[in-house]
Image (spheres, rainbow, N blue to C red):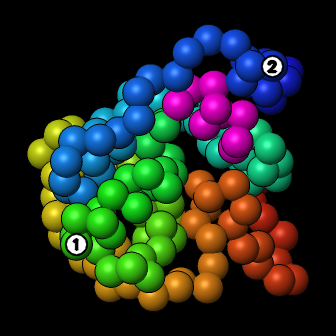
Amino acid sequence: MVVAAVKASATGGSAPPPVETGTLRGDLLVLLERLEASMSLDGQLSLLLLHAGIEDPELCEAIEEAAGPTGARLPQNVLQAAVARGELPADADPFAYEEVAGATLLVRRLNGLTTDAAYRELLVDHILLPALKSGGSAGQRGIFSGGPTPASGRPPLTPT
């Protein structure tokens, strides 16, 4: 029912404006703030939505279209602007952001750990920016990409 509601809402309403602060660091902080706000849902519900999005790439697209840049993904305009400003190499890959940002915030929230602005700054400065600047293709898609690379021969854990 939740999946159908999110998909149905993708055609209505207006999305927030694109993220454009003028710096990659600023853009990442805005994205993490949006992601934090979207995770204000019950933790179990967040896990269920994440699992549904992994199983249904169209759901990931519907959420991004309905809510605008949620912070779960690194929007193409942010990546391209950072490359154009010389903040990232031309072969920068969104994998590091899409794999680490949402998963880290979700796990910390589920365990009652801080995800406040100071923590998000540390996450950006010490993990996300260095990883994004490393460049090159990761060869996989992140968990929030809408098409993550599945494990072979291992069933996923499913939320109860």
Name the residue located 38 percent from the left edge and 53 percent from the top edge.
78
> Which of these two is toward me, 102 or 67?
67
Q: Are marks 1 and 2 in contact (CB under 8 Å)?
A: no
Say whether residue 107 is visible.
no
Circle 1 residues within 10 Å: few <14, some 14–19, many ≥20: few
Q: How many labels were placed on the picture?
A: 2
Say whether residue 5 is visible.
yes
Q: Mark 1 = which residue?
A: 86
Quadrant of residue 65 within the rendered picture: top right
Magenta residues, as a range? 60-68
Is residue 92 toward the left or the right of residue 153 in the image? left
The mark closer to the camera, 1 or 2, is 1
Q: Quadrant of the C terminus?
A: top right
Is residue 62 toward the left or the right of residue 90 in the image? right
Name the residue located 22 percent from the left edge and 72 percent from the top edge.
86
**The furthest residue to the front:** 84
- Which mark is drawn over residue 45? none
- As helix, strand or loop, the secondary structure at mark 2 comes to helix
Quadrant of residue 91 within the rendered picture: bottom left
Which residue type carries mark 2? Ala
Magenta segment: does it hold 65? yes
> Which of these two is toward me, 3 or 112?
3
Q: Position of residue 11 (x, y in %)?
A: 74, 19
Circle 2 residues within 10 Å: few <14, some 14–19, many ≥20: few
Magenta segment: does it hold 51? no
- Which mark is drawn over residue 8? 2
Q: CA distance from mark 1 to mark 2?
A: 39 Å
Name the residue located 52 percent from the left edge and 22 percent from the top edge.
15
Is residue 55 toward the left or the right of residue 141 in the image? right
Q: Position of residue 21 (x, y in %)?
A: 22, 42
**The furthest residue to the left:** 118
